[in-house]
Image (spheres, rainbow, N blue to C red):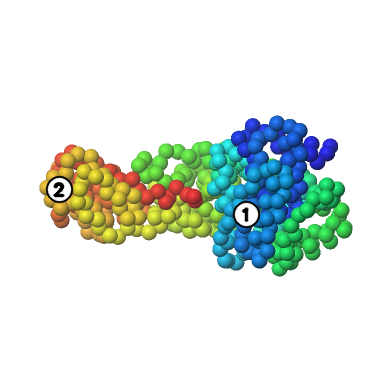
Amino acid sequence: MSLESRLLQALEPWRQAPAWWVAFSGGLDSAVLLHLLARLRDAHALPPIAAIHIHHGLQAVADSWVGLCRAQCEGLGIALAIRHVRVDEGASLERAAREARYQAFAGLLGEGEVLLTAQHQDDQAETLLLRLLRGAGVRGLAAMPTSRPLGGGQLVRPLLGVARAELETWACREQLAWIEDPSNLDIRLSRNFLRHEILPRLTQHWPAAGAVLARDAEQLAEADRLLGELAELDLATARTPAEPAWLALPSLELAPLRALPSARQRNALRHWLRGLTLPPEREHWVGWDNLRDAAEDAAPVWRLAGGELRRAGGRLWWLSGDWLQLPVAACDWADPRQALVLPGNGRVWLEGEAGAGRLQIRYRRGGEVLELAGRGHRDLKRLLQESGVPAFVRGRLPLLYADERLLAVANLPRLQAPAAGALRLCWTGPTGGAGLS
């Protein structure tokens, strides 16, 4: 089957997309992809095709690359968008450039549109080796998927089954011109070292090494999907309604997880934590053991890259963002008819009419006393314990004061002074606890 036919077959699921964008660096791989699509467009009904070139500003000749890309696109009758990005300096220039590039891609894609990139079989093999050497788990070793969500649309890699040698043969036969990025020869960069020093030597001994490694990545992707399905089954019994219901934080019931073998516990938690934080390293899982096995009256914490897991009330709670630091400053409430935004702690509002007096939102500092109808003056610390409020929430629950008198505790209508009458203090906590953006 010709390269054109295989490409068309790979793109069949996205034939009804509103638009196809080609990530066009001007290099060999993307030049072949762009010319193949232009040829297919002339013979088949395809979505509108346009190209996008990312100007990283890392090479002195980058401006001239824009001109070469524009000339190729004009010759094919394909519109070209240019995006300039800023690459942050850091330990890995490769990673920073990639992140900047994909951020620009995500901002470009409209709803349902498709970004086509030209990664091929050799790229997949390099990615697998890189991640293997970095100690990635099964999900990381699955390497690059054929497609994944990006922005409002999809990223699609239709050439993952094609070797770079075949692309180069096609380009030479068609007499294509392409850009040679000098940084691709710098073997100080990890991927270039694998590409120029390691994979050629592997191929000398195992000629099909690239194809075998790419196939291994596909098998690992299948294994990762099966592990995900197992995790969903194990998490189903742990995703019970949380109390208090107004505490809108990611949480799981602990008992169903404890009943699983250790390996399945880790698999379920690793799956649940995706989108919340970077996965913990293997040696860091001792933090889970300590959290799970701590005494019942303890308040253990497992700190991870994007936040922390707490244990309270027989549940695991995920905290991140503003939830990691208790609010300290009191807030005057000049107009109780309007909701009050609390720095680092969400917002509060009143249901009912506030009486006379200077209103203020404060937080627990110890020693607070609340008058309750029929019960007299009671210690607030004990009242919160009796109400089942998790310990990590008690220090940030807004307290409503009129002058120097404690009137009400947010979201706990039974904890308010007789003077408050039918007044209710309502609170929604900070949104930073929901996970990674």
Q: In the shown orientation, is residue 181 left or right of residue 54?
A: right
SS assignment at label 2: strand
User: Residue visible at 76% across and 33% down?
Assistant: 43
Question: At 35% across and 55% down in the image, what residue appears?
Answer: 344
| Observer-nearest of 299 and 343 | 343
Q: Is residue 357 left or right of residue 148?
A: left
Left or right side of 250 for 98: right
Q: Which of disc 2 and disc 1 is earlier in sequence? A: 1
Residue farthest toward the bottom in the current orientation of the protein: 188
* Label 1 CA crowd tier, 10 Å (few <14, some 14–19, many 20+): many
Q: Look at the image and tell me whether residue 215 can be seen.
A: no
Q: Position of residue 297 (x, y in %)?
A: 39, 54
Q: Which residue is mark 2?
A: 376
Mark linked to residue 65: none
**Amino acid type of the residue tagged 2 in the rendering:** Gly
Quadrant where the N terminus is found in the figure: top right
Q: Could you say which is closer to the camera, residue 159 or residue 318?
A: 159
Residue 299 percent across, percent down from the top left: 40, 56
Compared across the picture, whether 406 is left or right of 74 comes to left
Task: Please indicate, yes or no, whether residue 327 appears anywhere in the rendered image.
Answer: yes
**Residue 374 picture quarter:** top left
Instruction: Give the SS element for disc 1.
Output: strand
Q: Residue at x 60, y 35 (%)?
A: 18
Frontmost residue, 335 versus 110? 110
- Label 1 belongs to which residue? 54
Residue flagged by tag 1: what amino acid is it? Ile
